[in-house]
Amino acid sequence: MAKLGSLDELKKYAAARSVGRADKTVLAVGAATCGIAAGAKDTIKALEDAIKANGVSGAEVVETGCLGFCYAEPLVEVRAPGAVPVRYAGVDAALARRIIKEHIIGGAVVEGAILSKEVPR
Amino acid sequence: MAKITSNILVDVSGGKDVYNALAKAVSAAGLGKSVQVAAVDGFGVKAEGAVVKVLPSGGYYTGVAPEDADRIVQAAASGEGGSPVPAYTTNVRVALKNVGYIDPASIDDYIATRGYEALGGCLTNNTPQDVIAAVKASGLRGRGGAGFPTGLKWEFAGKSAGDKKYVICNADEGDPGAFMDRSVLEGDPHAVLEAMAICGYAIGADEGVIYCRAEYPLAVARLENAINQAEALGLLGDNILGTGFSFKISINLGAGAFVCGEETALINSIEGQRGEPRLKPPFPAAAGLWMKPSNVNNVETYACVRHIFLNGPEWFAGIGTEKSKGTKVFALAGKINNVGLIEVPMGTTLREIIYDIGGGIRGGKQFKAIQTGGPSGGCIPASLLDLPIDYESLASVGSMMGSGGLIVMDEDDCMVNIARYYLDFTVEESCGKCTPCRIGNMRLLEMLEEITSGKGKPEYINELRELGEVIKDASLCGLGQTAPNPVLSTMHYFMDEYEAHIRDHKCPAGACSALLKYVIDPEKCTGCTLCARNCPVDCIAGERRKTHVIDQERCIKCGTCMAKCRFGAISRV
Amino acid sequence: MPVADTDMAAKLAELDAYIDSLPTKEGKLITVLHKAQDIIGYLPFDAQHHIARRLGVPSSKVYGVVTFYSFFNIKPKGKYKIACCMGTACFVRGAQAIVDEFKKRLSVETGEATKDMLFSLDTIRCVGACGLAPVISVNGKIYGRVAPDDVNKIIEEYMAKDGGSVG
């Protein structure tokens, strides 16, 4: 990686990047200590396995920090291009598979598992 | 399967009428294959009546009646509908801006959120004096406890003469029940690194040290990764962004000592010594690490810094109250429904935090007190729930901001026992250097232990108060100066509980086991033997089908018998 | 026991290599103690003396630092280190009952190890997973929302793992 030589270079570098790339669906899993303690690693694996098993393209699992909803861990936030994010609470392996099948492939939110509380950004 | 293109989320916590109407409207319009109606339990927004949210746009309808269903469904099907509604939680996230949003392992994610732009801007366009002036103008105060103005601290360190200076980050989050610093380090490590570099430029330092708890291995790993990434891109290290400014950051592990949250004790610990506080003055700004001028701030304080430069100091100063600017992150825990991390503008009331954001008390129990400031803080009773949270108002009621732990207590928590718990903590964590803290807190603890076991004497009330004041006045560092707060504040607001323990040998909350007794009601006991079989110390006697009796001498008050009894024959008195 | 001695000698050699790799020895006592505890598992007096000689500081100073910080142990720990969080959030959600249950089941006090060295029991201050309170950890693996009834299950999980081979 080349070093950035000036503020302008930094700004150009930043302009060429955006979080979670706009053309991809991102499944962001809260993987701070609390999330991991609640089973986030299993959730990540289940999501990745289900993406592979269903041949889903254009969806990616990423780890993020803690969103603050400790009581609802493990948390998964689905960020689809052009859509407001949808957060799921208490995502175990079974729910992870449902999220891929019903939400990512079918477009229908998984009822009963949505954490609907607003978090401003 | 056909793909659903729009989802209508309905808050059904107030009833299912609207949900049913929407579901009916969807099937009547033959849109079942493209529009989905789903139930959720509340959005946490400031709105009246039934609330509906439409995805993917995220717009809201408020005050919805069943008659509105057709209109909403048609709008949703065409990809429109609804408008934004303010959320109960803060409308500004500052310290937690990126936490939970970006991938903390990716510097590209950070840079995409204008990461390192504040540093680049300072280095390219501002003098160190400009930088300090901006931090002063923002009104930012230390988020670790006492709330000292950050800009002033930087100015002192900047003005100190020295060939070598240090920027130190206090990441020794020792306050039990507080985990906001861990969240920032794990979720947005670059924000801290960038702010330390900005501070380095402002005060004239070329080296930074992060003193992090060894209990936070994930935070350490993410920091290490972040430092390597920033160095690879020339955002840390030599000649940052070609400006000639160089700044390196290293990590030092703590080893489990609460007192190391005190800045001079922390400095001693970085030097490999026992973490005992130093006499001040000299302050670290004059003689800190290796006796060189040093600036110490905590994680959350640094996490605010870049936003002051990206949005302007006046923006930051526009949030919060007159004397407490910006936002504060709190770790909400204890007997509350929505345990978690929240960021609210300074001046938000405790009631908003507990009921609007925290979702109220678990199990529908009665709120008793909220503890702020950890072992240095105090318990605030229900009568003060409308207190706006800022540094001054918390201090005025005998508590303090501290690092931001908020522990909610309900009717089952004994305030004397809570005071004893905190004193137990302080006594164990006192470094022992000064007498008032080492001996005085021990005496406080002994009296509290006697009170909670029913052996308290009436004169203890005065003695606790007097000794507490002496410890506050005479201790060397912040640990001792604040250690009696949990006792003094609970005595102030919950004197009746102290008196009940001392005078009546009763614990009103039923928490102090030495003051409890489990008894079997002979009317209700069927002699089923279940309690006797489950008693871990075999202290329940009685023949089958005859009344059983608990031997009070041997009973350890574990409560197992009461939990096991199927006839409600055992009670706690 | 010659086996133990050779074992310790090898561990101290590993530690020496680490000390030699440090750019400076000044102020590195706590860093070195962390490494030593990683390698040996605890900090026996022999190791403390050794570190003192290698860093050129008095043994008394090493002992002073070791005993100051709760992270450092002078006594060996069990194979499975049980740590019960006693942070405030865990405390108000019943952590004391969990500690008491472990004490009873393992017949040890906090800070001690079982005779077979399979388990040791400690209390710690807040692991920062307050949302899962009460929390315990076994060798770093975190168990959340623990009830006294779960204690035996957790102990048995590790006994089964060990196949009863350590006696």
Image: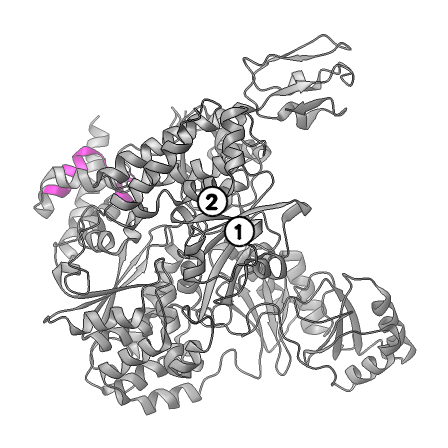
Asked where in the image residue B251 lies, by quadrant, the reply is bottom left
Q: Label 2 near label 1: C-beta < 8 Å? A: yes
Chain hosting mark 1: B
Q: Amino acid at mark 2?
A: Thr
- In the picture provided, is B423 more to the left or to the right than B268? right
- Residue that numbered label 2 is attached to: C88
Placement of A36 over or under B231, stated as above or below: above
Disc 2, SS: helix
Residue B18, percent from left and from top: 84, 69
* Percent x, y of residue B552: 58, 14
Which amino acid type is marked by label 1? Ala
Residue B274 spot, x, y in % from top left: 20, 45
Magenta stretch, overall SS: helix
Is residue C9 visible in this depiction of the protein?
Answer: no
Where does the magenta region start and end? C37-52
Query: What residue appears at the point 27 percent right and 34 percent down from the top-left corner?
Result: B439
Residues packed near mark 1 inside 10 Å, few (<14), some (14 to 19) or many (20 plus): many
Where is mark 1, residue-wise? B333
Mark 2 belongs to chain: C
Q: Are marks 1 and 2 on the same chain?
A: no
Viewer-side residue, A24 vs B418: B418
Q: Is residue C16 visible?
A: yes
* Residue farthest to the top, as pictured: B543
